[in-house]
Amino acid sequence: MSLFEHLSIAFDSIRANPVRTFLTTLGVLIGVFSVILLVGLGDAVRAYVLETFAGVGSNLLQINAGRQETRGFRPSSGTTKNKLTMRDVEVLERRGFMLDGVSPIVLGSGELRVSELRRNVIVIGVGPDYVDLRNLEIGRGRFIDEDDVDHYRRSVVVGQTIVQELFGDKTSPLGQTIYIASTPFRIVGITKRKGKTFGFDMDDLAFVPATAAQDLFDLETVTHILARAKDRNTVDPAIAEVKDVLADARGGETDFTVFSQDDMMDMVNNIMGTLTFFLGAIASISLLVGGIGIMNIMLVSVKERTREIGVRRAVGARWADILLQFLVEAVVVSLIGGLLGLLLGFVTIRIVAHFQPDLPVALSLSNVAMAIGFSLAVGVLSGVFPALRAADLDPVDALRYE
Amino acid sequence: MSTPVIALMGAARVYEMGAERIEALRGVDLEVAAGEFLAIVGPSGSGKSTLMNVIGCLDRATSGTYAIDGIDVRDLDDDALADLRNKKIGFVFQSFNLLPRQTALDNVSLPLRYAGVSRKERHRAAELALSRVDLADRLDHRPDQLSGGQKQRVAIARALVTNPSLVLADEPTGALDQKTGNEIIGLFERLNADGVTVLIVTHDRDVAKKTRRTITIVDGRIDSDEPNVGAA
């Protein structure tokens, strides 16, 4: 009997139980849907992250306090004995010939207040080079400058979200006074809108001179130091230079670590790897459960149709005809689930693409092939056992079955 | 003399279930020529169902020989037996055994599906078979739209569609009222007059009397084998 005949028998049987078939397909549907999301969105996020980091500058270095011998980026913890200070920043500015920019980073958060309006934001203490290192753009006014840092000046550069929330659209906030943790600061600049990165609002930040931030948060130290090698090819010598210069200035003590962009990229890849692993686990479990569901329903179906199997055998169906009948039915059910999952995945990806135009989401041909491949495999694996059971029935017993 | 449709010699069927040994058939010799119309009768447990299964190639004798249309089935494998059932035998069952969601035409076409006949060809053959049982006007009816007698006639059409050497009917009137049962037997008589070999397995002596030869099975053996005088 031809495959076409088996397919037509399978569709007859599916038509007889549309609701049951649909429910049976759900497991595979969810499984394939997760696979589509996993691959489609995972790749998109990875590309997006790489792109975002590349925009920051691939020759960026970050110097953290505390020594780390192993590879891989680790955010600064602040629990080390030997901290980084403004003195380290000055040394690097003066003696770092391989660097074209150095900025201290003093991280904190504080309550901003304009008359009676309050808002908690992240406050970043920086040096004048920061604007270049991070590719920030200033909309109005200016960024924090050398003078601000040297004179511990209460100057602040705020983002668009802060302007909108605290001043509305009517008044120009430039030159106005804003209170950060009850200390008055003068607004000297406003950054251009940058949008959200990983759901984090890049326009809800306030930049102040690093020295003023140290005063504000009562710190002697800086959180970490950002620096930039002159170009991509001199990253390694720049790292060596930073290490030498700092060790020399600190009297031979080397309790700090220099991370390059590659180290930070490693971290991103680590996170993505974990994400991929979990989504993959969800997909595998769904496919497994879906397969078990199909197997279960096929076993019920074999039992229900025992007499039919007997009749088919009596009128000339061979062992393989019965085997294929049930195997093809299982595969068709699984494929229907796979195609529905694919459709749902496609729609979801279109929706995501609509709301997150930055994310390069797409459904590639290989994703489609993979979804179909997975559902085929699930169908075959879950169909074999019930199909063998059906084919191995003795015709005489099957015909007598009540 | 032409080859007999059924040639059984010393056919025995023994079931072994653990230590127990059940001899359902204890050496049956039977020859049926083409064009015969006969009945096998016997009380339940006599072995007549086993005999029918052996004749229908659904089961095998454990000893002795059986040839259908001159083909010795002893050495045939499972697939070859399936092909034999497909080509040589048409089954009719007590409870019709039609596929519930399929039309009369599709039900009758079923054996031809397994014979690899094209859709067009098998529908043509099925139409012909249905007209032989006077159901040419019920091609697209499903079993639940047909009466008991009509269902059994669809089942008979399914048995005829491959032009088999033997139509094997197992209690064909058992699920029908007397009047409808008589009509079905009448249909078998008519088909037999057209040259179809018909073997009815029944426990009903009245049904058996309407055939031309009655074989009585008792305790796994042929007890009597006699012509029915005055039958059709």
Image: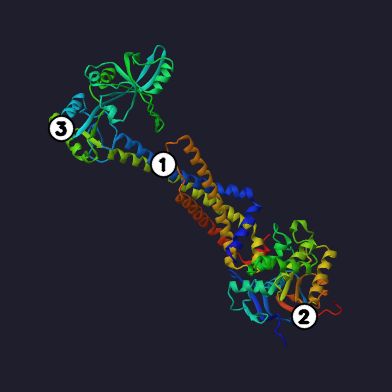
Q: Secondary structure at mark 3?
A: helix
Is residue A222 shown left or right of residue B188? left
- Determine the CA span between mark 1 and mark 2: 84 Å
Q: Secondary structure at mark 2?
A: strand
Residue shown at the point (39%, 23%) measured from the top left: A160
In the image, residue A223 above or below residue A338: above
Q: Nearer the viewer, residue A31 or B24?
A: A31
Q: Amino acid at mark 3?
A: Val
**Chain letter of the residue beneath label 1 in the structure image:** A
Residue at the outermost right position: B230
Measuring from the top left, give residue B146's x and y in whole percent: 78, 58
The residue singled out by tag 1 in the image is: A44
Report crowding for label 1: few under 14, some 14 to 19, many 20 or more residues within 10 A (C-alpha).
some
The image quarter containing residue A76 is: top left
In the image, residue B186 above or below residue A304: below
In the image, residue A354 above or below residue A214: below
The residue singled out by tag 2 in the image is: B225
Report crowding for label 2: few under 14, some 14 to 19, many 20 or more residues within 10 A (C-alpha).
some
Q: Nearer the viewer, mark 3 or mark 1?
A: 1
The residue singled out by tag 3 in the image is: A245
**Chain letter of the residue beneath label 2 in the structure image:** B
Residue shown at the point (48%, 54%) measured from the top left: A373
**Chain letter of the residue beneath label 3 in the structure image:** A
**Image quarter of the C terminus of chain A:** bottom right
Measuring from the top left, give residue A203's x and y in whole percent: 38, 25
The image quarter containing residue B90 is: bottom right
The image quarter containing residue A271 is: top left
Q: Nearer the viewer, residue A392 or A165?
A: A165
Asked if disc 1 and disc 2 are in contact, CB closer than 8 Å, the reply is no
Asked if disc 3 and disc 2 are in contact, CB closer than 8 Å, the reply is no
Measuring from the top left, give residue A267's x and y in whole percent: 32, 39
